[in-house]
Image: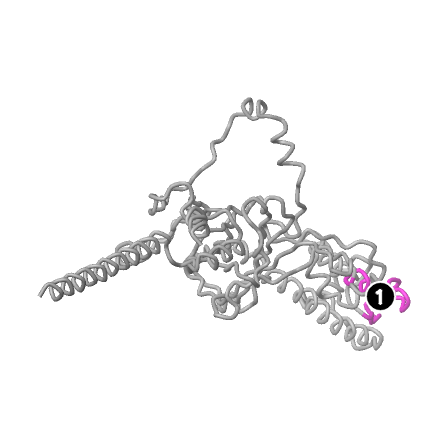
Amino acid sequence: MVKARLSFTNVLEGDSMDQDVESPVAIHQPKLPKQARDDLPRHISRDRTKRKIQRYVRKDGKCNVHHGNVRETYRYLTDIFTTLVDLKWRFNLLIFVMVYTVTWLFFGMIWWLIAYIRGDMDHIEDPSWTPCVTNLNGFVSAFLFSIETETTIGYGYRVITDKCPEGIILLLIQSVLGSIVNAFMVGCMFVKISQPKKRAETLVFSTHAVISMRDGKLCLMFRVGDLRNSHIVEASIRAKLIKSKQTSEGEFIPLNQTDINVGYYTGDDRLFLVSPLIISHEINQQSPFWEISKAQLPKEELEIVVILEGMVEATGMTCQARSSYITSEILWGYRFTPVLTLEDGFYEVDYNSFHETYETSTPSLSAKELAELASRAELPLSWSVSSKLNQHAELETEEEEKNLEEQTERNGDVANLENESKV
């Protein structure tokens, strides 16, 4: 029991027992010049670069997955609207221009064919001839009349006559199809412009995640913030652990996804994101980090994907921002520097310190090992070791005083018996 208490004391107190106050100063790694970096031992650089983890989700939120050998490409055409919206802007604008140009040329060609078949081209200078479309004397004029008809410009120079029933039917068809094309293409452009993807650019995540003690428990933490004054409505946060695993039957599951609890049962995952918030995951028995220690963390090949969702206050559309942390971006024994200060009548957020961290005293053991040490020493993790030792010393002092009183009483009884015997 004494050994367990001493070992647990050494774990929690670290190298120095007297440092109870944490320094809020961010620790920055010195930037070495190129010559100094070249002079570093080569085995160090090899150790750092040989275990490169391929990201599943990049830091900017884009998924690093490419779909190959997709044979059923017709499925993209069945949902042509979504396909057009998902295209890049240069292809979207090209299709936008090409659709209108092709429809104008197509109907312009039909108008020219009608005039050519009716013989309007042979009676251009004949005032007694009633053409299908007045002042239509070639393909260019037919093309311009097609544009005026579909866009309903109506300059009044080229006009269809009532002596051309085929022209009236074509006019109705082009008007209806032109309205459909306008609705489809303008709708695609409107949806693409109003997409909330750009709104996610102002939702920021800390560049690092940290692991440290919070309320006597080992926690994994990262920070999120919103740079805009218009807030995200009904914001919620989720986290996933991406790590390959092998089942007991020998099945290999690549990039297995495991939920990381960031307050689902307590409601802490629903955020009021007015100022930057630190999202905390308590490492307990249900946590995938339960058996991971500081020494084991760099050896793990894992990735933490964090997803922030909510509705844009200005448009009411759902917005999603993503980021990820690999093992090299998880700092053990650090905390985030506070960014919120109270000014004269308002709170101010200093985003210059948003990504900064400072080192704090944190045990290097895993949460499972800490729990085992706590159970052996019969100490809750939230108790301080020094207070428990003081309590133990007080109990020993009380026992000594009690023993002394009993010894005094015994001596008094012996003295009384001797006096009675003498009498």
The spot of residue 262 in percent (x, y) is: 52, 63
In the image, residue 368 above or below residue 166: above
Q: Observer-nearest residue: 348 or 36? A: 36
Q: Position of residue 212 (x, y in %)?
A: 46, 51
Foreground residue among 22 and 230: 22
In this picture, residue 139 sits left or right of residue 261:
right
* Dot 1: element: helix
Give the residue furthest to the front.
422
Q: Residues within 10 Å of mark 1 (few under 14, many from 20)?
A: some
Label 1 belongs to which residue? 110
Relative to the observer, which residue lies in front, 168 or 287? 287
Picture quarter with the C terminus:
bottom left
Locate the N terminus and report the quarter of the image it occupies.
Answer: bottom left
Q: Amino acid at mark 1?
A: Ile
Residue beneath the point at 51% across and 46% down: 331
Residue 125 in sight here: no
Q: Residue at x 63, y 27 (%)?
A: 42
- Taking the magenta stretch, the answer to whether it contains residue 14 is no
Q: Is residue 198 left or right of residue 257?
A: left
| Residue 381 image point, x, y percent | 43, 58
Q: Nearer the viewer, residue 404 or 25?
A: 404
Q: Is residue 31 above or below residue 91?
A: above
Where in the figure is residue 101, as x and y percent of width and height?
A: 75, 58
Which residues lie in the magenta part? 103-132
Tell me if residue 390 can be seen. Answer: yes
